[in-house]
Image: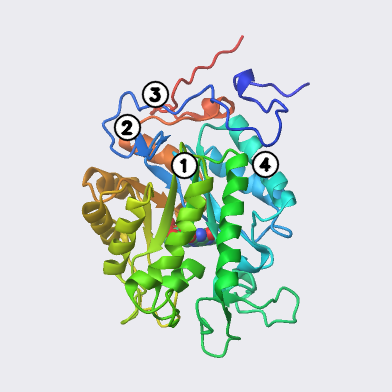
Amino acid sequence: MPAQQTWPASAMFDGAPRRSQPRAHPVQATTCRHSMSHLFQPLQIGPLTLANRITVAPMCQYSASEGTPGDWHMIHLGQLAISGAGMLIIEATAVEAEGRITAADLGLYSDANEAGLARVLDAARAHSPIKLAIQLGHAGRKASSRAPWEGGKQVPVGEPGGWPSWSASPVPHAPGEQPPLALDAAGLRRVRDAFAAAARRAARLGLDGIELHGAHGYLLHQFLSPLANQRTDEYGGSLENRMRFPIEVFDAVRAVFPADRPVWMRISATDWVPGGWDIEGTLALSHALKARGCAAIHVTTGGVSPLQAIQLGPLYQVPYAQRVKAEVGLPTIAVGLITEPEQAEAIIAGGEADAVSLARAMLYDPRWPWHAAAKLGAQVRVPPQYWRSQPREFKDLFEGATFGAR
Ligand SMILES: Cc1cc2nc3c(=O)[nH]c(=O)nc-3n(C[C@H](O)[C@H](O)[C@H](O)COP(=O)(O)O)c2cc1C
């Protein structure tokens, strides 16, 4: 028996050219009709409208081949695309091969990378109206590592999966590691150009937005943090100088990505180390980015030093997002140990952030937004193939759901 197709025919993959722009989806993101839930209200990130305020945080999968995604990404991003979240941010994606954290990182620096990602994106778009953004990054001195499940340590140059890494200064991430090479003027130009080239590829792929990875101790954060940046030229020293390269990268990406699609940055609001990057620097950078057309700030913390003393706990990073939102006024995404729908609802209702992003909770339960909608009395978009799963007690949970039989 041929597979029964229940999703509107026009929504299915139609063999359109792989680099097609996103099509208007037949099931457009819409406002929740019945719920008073703040979490399920639409959100504007610059010109981009999200159906609700739940975003899937970027999550490295260490499962690409020479930067190109394969079947794992189809499965992984496919299931998250039908999660009911308003936006899915694709994992940290390297803008040059040397900028990968591990040899198996996703990249967007070659035609093969672009074609591989087009395949995954086309499949996701055929079955979901979720907005698809990508996190572009460069690992800097944290490049040339093993995957977390292989211990995560630095791979020495000369061993398989090992290569020389680059940073602001020749200061290793951890004592005993091989130090990175400091980027000189030509190196800075090369990396900036690589960000812009990847952004052009992201534009051709029809991605809805770009998040620049300015956090977690990777290259842009290495320029921001005095713990990693010990330069004495115009890219080091003062706050203004340390912000210079990340801002140049932002400008280069913003200049080539279509004006009707947003670019924003993920920033670590503190290094959790005395004398490191802090919330004051974060506010200054956010103000500077806002003035240059940045559409949002995704507020996280840490990652630049093994000496970090993180005060972990539920919602532990939300106060940083709250300060950015209150003092900068850009749409702000909060992340970090947000696990319960009621927590997420309270963050939005209380004006602490404009959106939440979830990582581990989404891996553990990729239907988290469905369950949140059920708990908060909201509605969620679900593919028609799954409409029959709507629980009896939530008769109006799946937007537009109907089913019949003969
Ligand atoms: C498997 C995994 C991969 C991750 N990869 C990335 C990444 O590519 N980029 C990034 O900025 N953060 C990454 N993170 C951090 C998450 O985006 C998130 O900030 C962090 O896990 C805290 O959120 P949570 O408590 O909801 O998991 C990753 C986290 C996990 C669990």
Identify the mark nearer the N-term, 2 or 3.
2
In the rendered image, which quarter is residue 399 located in?
Answer: top left
Q: Which mark is residue 118?
A: 4
Q: Is residue 316 visible?
A: no
The residue identified by callout 2 is 377
Q: What separation in Å lies between label 4 and label 3 (alpha carbons)?
A: 34 Å
Is label 3 in contact with label 1 (beta carbons under 8 Å)? no
User: 321 and 7: which one is in front?
Assistant: 321
Q: What separation in Å lies between label 2 and label 3 (alpha carbons)?
A: 9 Å
Where residue 248 appears, x then y in whole percent? Answer: 46, 60
Q: Nearer the viewer, mark 4 or mark 3?
A: 4
**Kind of residue sitting beneath label 4:** Ala
Where residue 258 appears, x then y in whole percent? Answer: 51, 40
Point out the image quarter for the N terminus.
Answer: top right
The residue identified by callout 3 is 396
Q: Residue at x 30, y 48 (%)?
A: 330
Where residue 224 appears, x then y in whole percent? Answer: 40, 71
Q: Nearer the viewer, mark 3 or mark 1?
A: 1
Is label 2 in contact with label 4 (beta carbons under 8 Å)? no
The residue identified by callout 1 is 87
Question: What secondary structure is marked by label 4?
Answer: helix
Point out the image quarter for the C terminus.
Answer: top right
